[in-house]
Amino acid sequence: MNGTALALIVTGALLHATWNLLAKKAAGGAPFVWLYGVVSLAAASPLVVIEFVNGTAPLGVSAWLAIAVSAAAHLVYSLTLQQGYRASDFSVVYPVARGTGPLFAVLGAIVLLGERPTLLGGLGIVLILLGIAFVADVLAGVRAHASKARAGILWGAMTGVSIAAYTVVDGWAVRTLAIAPIAYYAFGLLLRTLFLAPAALRRTSALREQWRSNGRLIVAVGILSPTAYLLVLYAMQSAPVSYVAPTRELSMLLGVLFGARVLRERLSASRIAGTMLLLAGVTCLAVAK
């Protein structure tokens, strides 16, 4: 993986962890998701205009299929994540979601996209996934038989499946189909907003309440979320999906640190060990050819 791609992914990870922390504070469900989607769409629209002025190629059937599938997967991701944040702790849902995502994404990239990680790249993937398991502390949550922890693991894993789905589709779209990342993301965002609009607009009172209560969070998430993912899409243009997917899960490490500092959650020995594994894995991916 080249240095530029790594820098894009790490920056995206920081922004991703930040907007998820803000989304956890809001925990506003579907109305919150729709409102920050509208903000994201408004922010991305000028960039799409610039793309087309610069001569972006027309989108074909395959491109629109990729956009529609990605939009559906992103919508499932947003809704299950919000449900998880309402049902359990940030320190459970976020690591499990980000941890199970690359597991399925790497398998999907290998099976569907024909990617074959090198030995060093494969070692990096294994180390990162082990680190994720330690940081998420999933086994401890299961042993405790706490209903809240189990709910977090369930919703986190469901979110991880949707992460894997859109990661593989997005990698195919920007690498194989060569769709401009900004146009691709913006059209997907438009479809997501339209998909959720009927349900959201039936509850105008909930929308107004969300805006009154979480207006600043909505704007912040609406800007940070697309920025974080656009950085990943650009990274996918020059780095294999099977490397990008695990490396971007550095956001999970940052999320654990944010949880300790902002939400006053305890940083256990298991999470410290997981941090070291994550760092070792990212180092392997950074130098893998």
Image (cartoon, rainbow, N blue to C red):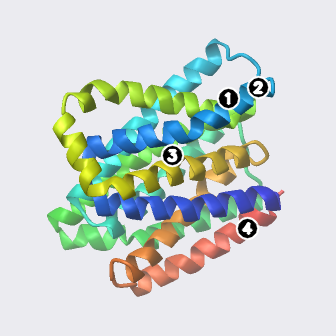
Image coordinates for residue 122, horizontal then vertical, percent: 69, 58
The residue carrying mark 2 is 53
The residue carrying mark 1 is 49
Q: Is residue 246 above or below residue 43?
A: below
Q: Are marks 4 and 3 in contact (CB under 8 Å)?
A: no
Q: Earlier in the sequence, mark 2 or mark 4?
A: 2
Q: Residue furthest bottom?
A: 269
Crowdedness of circle 3 by 10 Å Cα count: few (<14), some, many (20+)? many
Q: Are marks 1 and 2 in contact (CB under 8 Å)?
A: yes
Q: Nearer the viewer, residue 26 or 286?
A: 26
Q: CA distance from mark 3 to mark 2?
A: 37 Å
The residue carrying mark 4 is 284
Q: Earlier in the sequence, mark 1 or mark 4?
A: 1
Q: Quadrant of the N terminus?
A: bottom right
Q: Nearer the viewer, residue 74 or 133?
A: 74
Crowdedness of circle 2 by 10 Å Cα count: few (<14), some, many (20+)? few
What is the secondary structure assignment of the residue under circle 1? helix
